[in-house]
Image: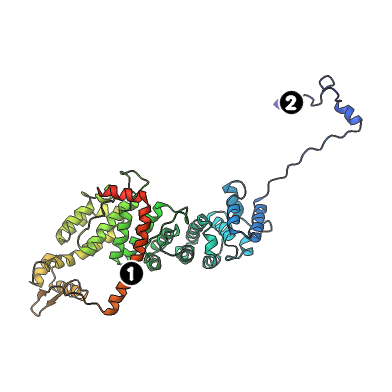
């Protein structure tokens, strides 16, 4: 075999001829009473459990949250090694989370909990502990490590999905968001995660306390991991939530905020897919809400604002002519299905007869029910009566039906508001004026935004 022919390695002992002047051979040194030096021993690297125990010691003894945050960010050698240590148990098999208090050790718990929830091989964390932490953590300390809060939010969603109970993520995400943000007017990376969870689970009403607070503050100082896409996802998904709740005016506002947002990071030929999809949904919502489409702001990305020639603008051109609307809806259904807008399309078609009737009020004073039915595409006279009565009850038209089946349209009466309502509106207007003045000062300092808006206007 090859091993039999291996040459004998040369002796490492120097011969007297090659020894430096004044030195002596090893045998002579040994004979003179000298001893060979012991080989140096290299300590084995600490195990992940030992690393975790060292980090626990720092977490429980630190009296400087900023220093602790900096230490944990660079702990161990590589990010992978750090996360592996944080996601494990101690050398005795104890759970480190049991030794920490969510309020007193917020930063330490955030690092450990976020690592545990995003590492597939980590020991499971009971959802009761997740809920307890999200209700009791220290917001000031959490804001020192915003990237771990975002990581925790994503981990909560992953954990809920793994348990087969996606709705379980909504309560802790809500508590996390409510405590983490200085107030809900600040956009955080948690906003799109929370609203997406509500939309995905069809728990739409849970998102309302967040969606009903307008976003007026965006700070990359407070939230360095905040991405521009977070704003797009939040408003796009918020529009979906409002649409599902039939709050079409709010849905249109959210879709427009997403569709018309200046998109700084892409070339003019590449708008965000969220903006394009928001523009499509906005068109359908506007048909439901107004019976027609409204123009987008001038600074909107040209690709987003130019949907001409497609199924959506074809539908808008014939709306609310019910016969043509049905033809377009049938012919172009694959296009709407590809965009997951079949449900909205159905609502648009259902509203077409009502908008056709409303257009009649602009021209006629009196019409019979059969005449209205022909315009609205409804053959059954009793169905026409039901629709007209429904529109009268909801205030969509001001009309009356006599015993002969004639409908008389009246001019809209001016709305009368009570003193209390006027006072409430004035109070809200004053509050909004203060917010707008603050925003105006902020925008005046944002040269990039002003440049993009001005370029889009000319």
Q: Is residue 20 above or below residue 127?
A: above
Q: Secondary structure at mark 2?
A: helix
Residue denoted by label 1: 430
Neighbour tally class for label 2: few under 14, some 14-19, many 20 plus, Cα within 10 Å: few
Relative to 14, say whether 366 is above or below: below
Q: Neighbour class for label 1 at 10 Å: few (<14), some, many (≥20)?
A: few
* Lower position in the chain sequence, tag 2 or tag 1: 2
**What residue occupies the far bottom of the structure in this picture?**
403
Which percent across, then down, holds residue 265?
Answer: 37, 46
Q: 331 left or right of 28? A: left
Residue 303 seen: no
On residue 4, which mark appears?
2
What is the CA distance from the residue labelled 2 to the residue labelled 1?
96 Å
User: Quick check: marks 2 and 1 in contact, CB under 8 Å?
Assistant: no
The image quadrant that residue 17 belongs to is top right
| Frontmost residue, 190 versus 441 | 441
In x, y percent, where is residue 377?
14, 65
**Image depth: mark 2 or mark 1 in front:** 1
Q: How is the image coloured?
A: rainbow
Q: Is residue 304 above or below residue 417?
A: above
Q: Position of residue 403 (x, y in %)?
A: 9, 80
Q: Residue furthest top?
A: 17
Q: Secondary structure at mark 1?
A: helix
Q: Residue at x 58, y 53 (%)?
A: 70
Q: Give residue 45's position: percent from left, percent from top.
A: 68, 46
Which quadrant would residue 432 be assigned to in this image? bottom left
Q: For residue 359, what is the image quadrant?
A: bottom left
Give the number of marks: 2
Whether residue 138 is visible: yes
């Amino acid at each position: 075999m090859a091993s039999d022919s291996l040459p004998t390695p040369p002796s490492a002992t120097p011969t007297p001829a090659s020894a430096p002047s004044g030195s002596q051979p090893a045998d002579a040194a040994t004979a003179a009473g000298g001893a060979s030096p012991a080989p140096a021993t290299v300590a084995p690297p600490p195990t992940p459990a030992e690393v975790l125990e060292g980090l626990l010691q720092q977490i429980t003894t630190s009296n400087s949250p900023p220093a602790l945050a900096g230490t944990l960010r660079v702990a161990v050698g590589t990010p992978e090694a750090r996360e592996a240590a944080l996601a494990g148990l101690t050398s005795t098999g104890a759970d480190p989370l049991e030794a920490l208090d969510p309020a007193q050790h917020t930063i330490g718990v955030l690092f450990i909990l976020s690592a545990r929830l995003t590492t597939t091989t980590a020991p499971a964390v009971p959802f009761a502990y997740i809920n307890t932490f999200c209700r009791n953590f220290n917001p000031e300390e959490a804001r020192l490590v915003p990237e771990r809060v975002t990581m925790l939010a994503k981990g909560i969603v992953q954990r809920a999905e793994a348990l087969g109970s996606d709705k379980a993520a909504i309560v802790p995400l809500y508590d996390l968001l409510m405590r983490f943000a200085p107030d809900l007017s600040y956009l955080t990376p948690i906003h799109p995660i929370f609203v997406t969870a509500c939309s995905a689970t069809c728990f739409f009403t849970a998102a309302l306390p967040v969606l009903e607070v307008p976003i007026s503050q965006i700070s990359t100082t407070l939230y360095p991991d905040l991405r521009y896409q977070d704003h797009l996802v939040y408003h796009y998904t918020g529009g979906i939530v409002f649409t599902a709740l039939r709050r079409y005016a709010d849905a249109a506002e959210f879709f427009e905020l997403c569709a018309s947002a200046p998109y700084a990071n892409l070339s003019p030929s590449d708008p965000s897919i969220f903006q394009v999809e928001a523009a499509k949904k906005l068109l359908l919502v506007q048909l439901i809400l107004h019976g027609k489409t409204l123009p987008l702001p001038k600074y909107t990305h040209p690709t987003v604002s130019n949907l001409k020639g497609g199924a959506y603008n074809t539908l808008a051109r014939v709306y609310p002519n019910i016969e043509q609307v049905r033809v377009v809806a049938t012919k172009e259904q694959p296009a709407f299905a590809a965009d997951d807008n079949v449900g909205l399309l159905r609502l648009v078609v259902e509203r077409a007869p009502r908008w056709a009737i409303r257009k009649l009020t602009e021209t006629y004073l009196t019409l019979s029910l059969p005449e209205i039915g022909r315009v609205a595409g409804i053959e059954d006279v009793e169905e026409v009566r039901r629709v007209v009565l429904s529109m009268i009850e909801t205030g969509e038209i001001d009309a009356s039906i006599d015993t002969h089946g004639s409908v008389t349209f009246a001019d809209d009466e001016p709305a009368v508001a009570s003193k209390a309502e006027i006072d409430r509106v004035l109070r809200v207007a004053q509050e909004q004026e203060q917010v707008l003045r603050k925003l105006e000062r902020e925008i005046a300092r944002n040269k990039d935004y002003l440049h993009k808006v001005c370029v889009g206007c000319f």
